[in-house]
Amino acid sequence: MNIILLGFMGSGKTSIGKMLSKKKDFNFIDTDLEIEKRNQMSINNIFKDLGELFFRNEEKKLLNDIKEKNNIVLSTGGGFACNSQNIKKLNNFGLTIYLKYSNNKLFERLKKQRKERPLIKDLNDSDLKIFIKKYLHKRKEYYTQADNIIECDKLDENQILRKINSLIVPK
Ligand code: S3P
């Protein structure tokens, strides 16, 4: 089986995915890291020099390339699941889990980590708040098609991991 983590930027998909893959002894793929590796460029530079459309295309290609793999924990970039084709393919690939946070919590988390994220790196606090509201509203439609949704606002990483485990271990 495969486990796929979805959610907005700053939801901890990479760090939780890594921990989960160790625990389950699964291979770990982080879509952003994989795309950086394939292009030998940072996400910031891919956006700057090649454009967002190129990046979205890389996401689609990657999904296609891994579709036969098994025993993978896949941590997706925040926009990865956000079109009808990709979310469908992710749901076919394995168990999808949306790590859900409120706008306020996302703001708290993201205001400390803007630099590496091309879509928000130049935004001030008030524009970041507006960005989160607008994008989360648009993306909710896709994130909520995940097989499972975990409300993460009040949970720490270990509690989130335990919740994920309870979803994948048969009772
Ligand atoms: C993006 C999220 C980022 C990265 C890129 C675009 C998005 O991933 O894929 O900057 O569109 O939300 P994280 O969710 O890991 O920050």
Image (cartoon, helix red, strand yellow):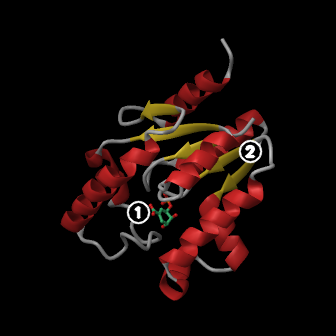
- Answer above or below: position of 170 versus 76: above
Task: Tell me if residue 16 can be seen.
Answer: no
The local secondary structure at tag 1 comes to: loop
Q: Position of residue 64 (x, y in %)?
A: 71, 59
Residue depicted at 30% across the width and 57% down the height: 132
Q: Residue at 36% x, 61% y: name it.
A: 112
Residue 138: image location, x then y, percent: 33, 54
> Label 2 neighbourhood size at 10 Å, few (<14), some (14-19), many (20+)?
many
The yes-or-no answer for disc 2 within 8 Å of ligand 1 is no
Q: Amino acid at mark 1?
A: Gln
Which of disc 1 and disc 2 is earlier in sequence? 2
Residue ID at (45%, 69%) = 117
- Residue at point 28% right, 72% down? 123
Residue wearing tag 2: 72
In the picture, the disc for residue 113 is: 1
Q: How many marks?
A: 2
The picture places residue 108, in percent across and down from the top left corner, at 30, 52
